[in-house]
Image (cartoon, rainbow, N blue to C red):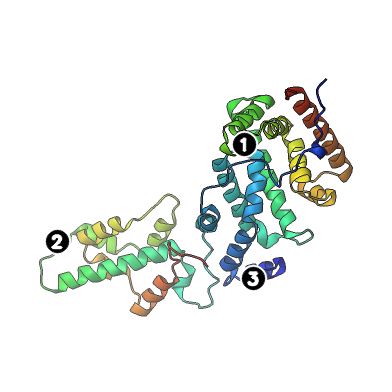
């Protein structure tokens, strides 16, 4: 007759016999988790500045356009021939109201990459000067407000 | 850092990330092993543990503090495990026993258990329990969790938990006895 197994008589382990996780797993896990957290919403605007009402994506796009535009402008003003002569499409683009631009950028699925902006301003050198009117300080504030993608945590 | 400090700092956006990092470091091991005991596989446990803490982040602001913080986190982890195991069955149209068999195969393949025949049978017996009963067994046998706390974690009455554990122990003992050579 078999000896009945009694759980109480069996040495109780703190956990089942399972292999340990890889070395350093618990050191790295917090970083992996923090990287997966949803981006924090933009802080409540304390200033009435118009920039604070735009989403981070729009602010980043506008800041990128301003930086690219400054490069294009300096190249243009240095006396070099324009890469592409200004044509009617440039004028048409310059006439696009800022609100429409913001609305387009806010459209779900619309993604403006830096390469798009570079192409745009290369083909239409005057576009940045046409609708962007922010000071350097405002641009710096907008850039500083952007969360760093590589933020690490204590 | 004490739980009340973590919760206070979490309410402040300026210290939220730091507070949450402290919370993760404080409870990551307990959550991981609670999950690992249920799903066995490390990679699955890793994914689920991360999912648990992401959910904690999303809902911690609304935590009513009518239970201990860890009990609340444990409850999230428990639901994630049970949902994962249910989803596995639905996805692969696996009956109850097959998922248990799959988990048992992972246990057998685990190098930590090599050579310990009784422990292997014990683990096989535990893995054959229904998911919720196995959960109760793990919480009581391995974590020595009081039934009152277990009731908060599982949303089940103390009486039902005691009955479930008693039956689980009987099943485990019968299985090991039947499958162990003299």
Count of marks overlaid on the render:
3
Which numbered circle lies on residue B9?
A: 3
Q: Is residue B124 visible?
A: yes
Decide which of tag 3 and tag 1 comes sooner along the chain: 3
Labels 3 and 1 touching (C-beta < 8 A)? no
Using the image, name the chain to which the residue with label 3 belongs.
B
Same chain, labels 2 and 3 = no
Which numbered circle lies on residue A83?
A: 2
Element class at badge 1? helix
B118 sits to left or right of A29: right
Residue closest to the far front: B182
Residue at image position (15%, 74%) is A77
Element class at badge 2? loop
Using the image, name the chain to which the residue with label 2 belongs.
A
Q: Nearer the viewer, residue B14 or B135?
A: B135
Depth check, mark 2 against mark 3: the one in front is 3
Cα gap from disc 1 to disc 2, whole angstroms: 71 Å
Q: Nearer the viewer, residue A130 or A119?
A: A119
The residue to which callout 1 is attached is B113
Cα gap from disc 3 to disc 1, whole angstroms: 42 Å
Using the image, name the chain to which the residue with label 1 belongs.
B
Same chain, labels 1 and 2 = no
Depth check, mark 3 against mark 1: the one in front is 1
Question: Is B87 located above or below residue B8 in the figure?
Answer: above
Cα gap from disc 2 to disc 3, whole angstroms: 54 Å
Residue A9 percent location from the top left of the image:
81, 38
Element class at badge 3? helix
Residue B42 percent location from the top left of the image:
56, 42
Q: Residues within 10 Å of mark 1 (few under 14, many from 20)?
A: some
Residue A119 percent location from the top left of the image:
24, 57
């Amino acid at each position: 007759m078999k000896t009945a197994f009694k759980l109480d008589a069996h040495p109780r382990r703190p956990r089942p016999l399972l292999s340990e996780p890889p070395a350093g797993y618990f050191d790295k896990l917090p970083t992996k988790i923090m990287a997966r957290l949803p981006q924090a919403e933009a802080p409540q605007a304390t200033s009435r500045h118009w920039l604070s009402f735009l989403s981070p994506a729009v602010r980043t796009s506008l800041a990128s356009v301003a930086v690219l535009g400054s490069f294009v402008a300096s190249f243009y003003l240095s006396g070099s021939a324009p890469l592409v002569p200004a044509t009617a499409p440039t004028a048409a683009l310059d006439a696009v109201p800022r609100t429409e631009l913001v609305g387009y950028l806010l459209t779900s699925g619309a993604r403006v990459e830096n390469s798009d902006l570079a192409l745009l301003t290369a083909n239409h050198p005057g576009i940045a000067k046409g609708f962007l009117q922010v000071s350097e300080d405002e641009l710096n504030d907008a850039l500083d407000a952007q969360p760093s993608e590589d933020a690490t945590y204590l | 850092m004490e739980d009340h400090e973590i919760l206070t700092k979490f309410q402040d956006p300026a210290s939220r990330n730091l507070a949450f990092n402290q919370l993760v470091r404080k409870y990551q091991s307990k959550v991981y092993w609670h999950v690992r005991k249920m799903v066995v596989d490390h990679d699955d446990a890793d994914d689920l543990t991360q999912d648990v803490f992401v959910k904690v982040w999303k809902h911690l602001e609304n935590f009513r503090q009518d239970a201990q913080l860890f009990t609340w986190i444990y409850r999230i982890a428990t639901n994630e495990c049970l949902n994962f195991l249910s989803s596995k069955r639905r996805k692969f149209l696996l009956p109850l026993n097959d998922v248990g068999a799959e988990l048992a195969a992972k246990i057998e393949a685990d190098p930590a258990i090599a050579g310990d025949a009784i422990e292997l049978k014990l683990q096989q017996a535990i893995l054959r329990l229904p998911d919720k009963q196995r959960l109760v067994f793990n919480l009581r046998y391995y974590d020595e969790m009081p039934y009152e706390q277990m009731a908060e974690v599982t949303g089940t009455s103390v009486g039902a938990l005691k009955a479930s554990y008693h039956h689980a122990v009987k099943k485990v003992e019968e299985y090991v006895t039947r499958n162990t050579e003299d």
